[in-house]
Image (cartoon, grey):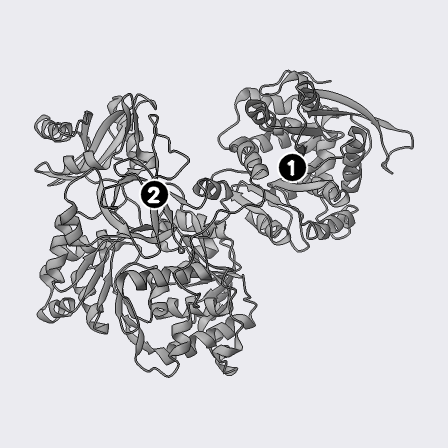
């Protein structure tokens, strides 16, 4: 009997149904009593005809309670969907049949139930854990009714996969009976996987159907029925369902918790291979009980409503021209294409083209195919350039998750992208071994045999080059990549949360190249110093001779003036690209420059810097260092680089204002804003009216294709059709220039309306003795107060409230713009992202400021 009510479950949704069984495991004429949650009667009473049915199947050891959020979502939004969440037989509050029910029996049981319910309209299955494979078995047998498939942390267990360690333990004869049936240990362990921990009343609800050993027989039988061995009685049924999944062509949605010790990301990758049409979202930080850890109801209903429509995209600037066009056109060019400065080395265009083709053939021989994901953990330089273009030659997808994300962020990015191959330097391979990163291991250099074996290295780049060269391939031997196929997964900096994978197609990468060429006049014959790793991807495609300065790319602050000048001298550079943090250190170390090094920088005609706002005084000093360069600061992001552009003269002409002036849209790009309302929420329509603050929207042919395995994030970013929502806020002025006022997540929701942070920060930084500043909120939304957290010159010795004199000066400076600050706090150094060393972590500072103002010990942020 149901002993509810249970939190989050409406009593009218709980029902019992006794139906005949057609399972061969039951005696003919047997009927079983099922329990299910069903809102069908509620919809009928309201006169609502459902758009379809969600058939939800739980796994082990949960019950239909797992799906309660779907019912709440439908009730709150009056959505016309019928939801049927079953308690499988021997589970939840359904009958204990006294018979061992195997996978085939459970699929048959589910069919008996849906037949009895008379389901004849479109049905979308929703499954979790072993309920996932059972729901897929029903889907394969009812294709005429099937409208879609939703899966959360489940598997179809292809041959060759080991049983997860947690299930190996639970199924061991010495543990199985005690762990799953005699005691409630298996249930408690499963419930402990929730992150954050389940509330006591929720945990009790999950335990309610399983309070005695007799009620837990299904739990034990479920574990015993896992068909991990080839001769297991349920293996034929599993193999049949696994094969049938590939034939399902209906829309699919995979929602995943990657912190799952049972169904890890490798099972997600297998499902993606079997259901290539699936939309995928990985909830970083969520685990096995993803329906408890995160809101899955909202994305499920968004997906149901989205259908097959895709956001419109801006037209390309010109006809598609492959990224390797320059290489293919310069096979007889013996001028330098790529240069390394430490140790000194260079390749001509002819040599680079041959090397790319040799490596592509070698990679092809070990199984790299169009669409294969290849993770490149190699510093910028000749090796990385060769690897990038060899992958593009094959149509493989490069995964560029750089060490600038930090060890934790890098591992999270690699596991999220799920590469089939991983190519790295020794340090990266050690990390891959220690942290179990996916992919066939390939060493960038030759390693001692013993070390290679320990690290699981199966190939080396020198071996692949030699194997490819033996076939003497020509570029014409390769099939051109599909322009609209995936080409690259690049990662955001992680400064506003876990780094997001951003997918570009070959056409979009080419559009990025063409936008840079059209905006800055970059053309064959240019010479580029790439002080920012992503430009290693674009230099050869632009026809520019490229060099990376001698620096630690994971720390932009390590770029010295001498290293920049030496790199410029190595290629007679005409163009330099470096981040603001890198340029700041270049200026700090400029006194070390020799006369020859200064002359090398005087030859630079274009200097670009992006990644964070750059103060005009800093740019002016950079101009003095490269007096003949046009100094530009393009605004953009990993999802669209660049978006707008402005030079030093333009910044001076714009003067002071609310935010940072980042100029006008680059070639082929359009910019608008989604105006903020009184609560700080963006509108749903774009506006180009001057002076209105809103979320910045971008449209361009080089905007990313999508976020990788982050379907929910992608839906949000494209929710205004035809535009990419950047997450930044700003306004357009009467001259069409864009002013960036901060991030949408950093807007203060005050009692008098939304307040963007940048203007206040600039005013605070104008006070003598002030360094960088961050305006952060404290208090509840709608009544937030402003706090300024600041660096000082010289740096504060310890964090805490600013001295009264300095605090008064800051408050007065900010008050001139009508902004009231409730506190000024100083810190020795503001926390910033790893990649750029520039983007301040305001979300972290807001929490620190709130704790500091609440009293108690003041800690370092």
Q: Is residue 282 visible?
A: yes
Identify which residue, 308 or 88, lies in the foreground: 308
The label shown at residue 648 is: none
Q: Indicate left or right for 301 with 596 as reference.
A: right
Q: What element carries label 2?
A: strand
Please provide percent x and percent y for residue 850.
Answer: 28, 26
The residue sitting at 10% across, 59% down in the picture is 624
Indicate the quadrant containing the C terminus: top left, top right, bottom left or bottom right: top left
Provide the residue designation for mark 1: 126
Question: Considering the numbered disc 1 on the image, is that residue within a helix, a strand or a loop?
Answer: strand
Residue bearing mark 2:
672
Residue pictured at 23% horizontal, 42% vertical: 734
Count residues near mark 2 (Cα–Cα under 10 Å), then give few for <14, some for 14-19, many for 20+. many
Residue 143 falls in image quadrant: top right
Query: Can you give x and y, in whole percent of width and height, for residue 351 in the image?
Result: 38, 80
Q: How far apart are marks 2 and 1 (CA)?
A: 39 Å
Q: Is residue 46 above or below residue 604?
A: above
For marks 2 and 1 on the same chain, the one whose residue lies earlier in the sequence: 1
Relative to residue 611, is residue 235 drawn left or right?
right
Q: Position of residue 428 (x, y in %)?
A: 41, 59
Residue 444 horizontal/vertical position (percent) = 42, 68
Count of numbered circles in the view: 2
């Amino acid at each position: 009997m149901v002993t509810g009510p249970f939190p989050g479950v409406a009593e009218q949704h709980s029902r019992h149904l006794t139906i005949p069984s057609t399972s061969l495991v039951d005696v003919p004429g047997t009927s079983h009593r099922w329990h299910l949650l069903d809102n069908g009667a509620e919809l009928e009473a309201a006169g609502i005809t459902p758009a379809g049915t969600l058939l939800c199947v739980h796994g082990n050891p949960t019950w239909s309670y797992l799906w309660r959020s779907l019912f709440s979502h439908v009730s709150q939004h009056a959505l016309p969907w019928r939801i049927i969440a079953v308690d499988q037989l021997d589970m939840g509050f359904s009958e204990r049949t006294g018979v061992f029910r195997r996978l085939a029996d459970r699929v048959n049981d589910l069919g008996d139930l849906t037949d009895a319910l008379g389901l004849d309209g479109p049905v979308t299955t929703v499954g979790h854990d072993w309920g996932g494979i059972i729901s897929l078995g029903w889907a394969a047998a009812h294709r005429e009714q099937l409208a879609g498939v939703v899966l959360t942390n489940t598997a179809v267990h292809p041959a060759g996969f080991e049983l997860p360690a947690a299930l190996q333990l639970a199924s061991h004869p010495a543990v199985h009976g005690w762990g799953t049936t005699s005691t409630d240990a298996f249930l408690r362990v499963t419930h402990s996987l929730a992150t954050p921990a389940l509330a006591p009343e929720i945990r009790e609800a999950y335990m309610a159907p399983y309070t005695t050993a007799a009620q837990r027989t299904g739990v034990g039988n479920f574990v015993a029925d896992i068909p991990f061995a080839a001769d297991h009685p349920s293996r034929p049924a599993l193999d049949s369902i696994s094969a049938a999944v590939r034939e399902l062509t209906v829309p699919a949605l995979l929602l995943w918790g990657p912190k799952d010790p049972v169904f890890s990301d490798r099972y997600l990758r297998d499902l993606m291979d079997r259901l290539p049409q699936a939309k995928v979202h990985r909830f970083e930080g969520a685990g096995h009980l993803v329906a408890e850890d995160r809101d899955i109801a909202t994305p499920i209903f968004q997906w149901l409503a989205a259908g097959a429509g895709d956001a419109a995209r801006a037209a390309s600037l010109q006809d598609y021209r492959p990224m390797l066009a320059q290489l293919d056109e310069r096979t007889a060019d013996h001028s330098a294409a790529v240069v390394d400065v430490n140790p000194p080395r260079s390749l001509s265009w002819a040599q680079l083209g041959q090397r790319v083709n040799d490596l592509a053939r070698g990679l092809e021989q070990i199984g790299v195919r169009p669409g294969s994901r290849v993770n490149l953990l190699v510093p910028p330089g000749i090796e990385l350039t060769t690897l990038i273009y060899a992958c593009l030659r094959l149509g493989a997808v490069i995964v560029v998750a750089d060490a600038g994300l930090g060890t934790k962020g890098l591992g999270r990015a690699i596991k999220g992208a799920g590469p089939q191959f991983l190519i790295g330097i020794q340090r990266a391979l050690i990390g891959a071994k220690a942290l179990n990163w996916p992919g066939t291991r390939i060493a960038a250099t030759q390693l001692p045999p013993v070390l290679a074996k320990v690290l699981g290295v199966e190939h080396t780049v020198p071996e692949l080059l030699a194997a490819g060269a033996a076939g003497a391939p020509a570029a014409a031997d390769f099939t051109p990549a599909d322009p609209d196929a995936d080409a690259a997964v690049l990662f955001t900096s992680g400064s506003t949360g876990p780094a997001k994978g951003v997918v570009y197609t070959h056409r979009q990468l080419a559009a990025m190249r063409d936008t840079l060429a059209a905006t800055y006049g970059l053309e064959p014959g240019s010479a580029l110093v790439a002080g920012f790793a992503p430009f290693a991807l674009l230099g050869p495609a632009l026809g520019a001779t490229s060099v990376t300065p001698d620096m630690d790319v994971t720390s932009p602050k390590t770029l010295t003036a001498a290293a920049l000048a030496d790199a410029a001298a190595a290629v007679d550079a005409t163009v330099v690209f470096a981040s603001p943090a890198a340029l700041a250190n270049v200026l700090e170390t400029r006194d070390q420059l020799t006369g020859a090094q200064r002359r090398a920088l005087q030859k630079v005609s274009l200097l670009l810097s992006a990644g964070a706002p750059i103060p005009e005084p800093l740019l002016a000093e950079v101009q003095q260092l490269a007096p003949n360069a046009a100094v530009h600061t393009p605004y953009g992001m990993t999802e669209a680089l660049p978006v707008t552009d402005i030079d030093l003269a333009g910044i001076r002409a714009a003067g002071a204002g609310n935010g940072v002036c980042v100029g006008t849209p680059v070639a082929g790009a359009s910019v608008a804003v989604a105006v903020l309302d009184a609560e700080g929420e963006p509108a749903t329509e774009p506006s180009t009216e001057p002076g209105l603050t809103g979320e910045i929207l971008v449209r361009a042919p080089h905007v990313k294709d999508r976020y990788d395995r982050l379907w929910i994030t992608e839906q949000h970013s494209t929710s205004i059709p035809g535009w990419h929502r950047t997450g930044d806020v700003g306004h357009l002025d009467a001259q069409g220039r864009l002013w960036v006022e901060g991030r949408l997540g950093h807007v203060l929701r005050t009692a008098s309306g939304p307040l963007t942070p940048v203007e206040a920060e600039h005013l605070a930084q104008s006070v003598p003795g002030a360094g960088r500043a961050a305006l952060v909120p404290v208090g509840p939304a709608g009544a937030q107060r402003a706090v300024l957290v600041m660096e000082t010159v010289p740096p504060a010795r310890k964090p805490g409230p600013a001295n009264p004199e300095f605090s008064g000066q800051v408050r007065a400076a900010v008050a001139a713009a009508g902004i009231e600050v409730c506190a000024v706090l100083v810190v020795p150094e503001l926390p910033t992202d790893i990649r750029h060393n520039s983007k301040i972590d305001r979300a972290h500072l807001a929490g620190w400021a709130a704790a500091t103002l609440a009293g108690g010990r003041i800690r370092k942020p």
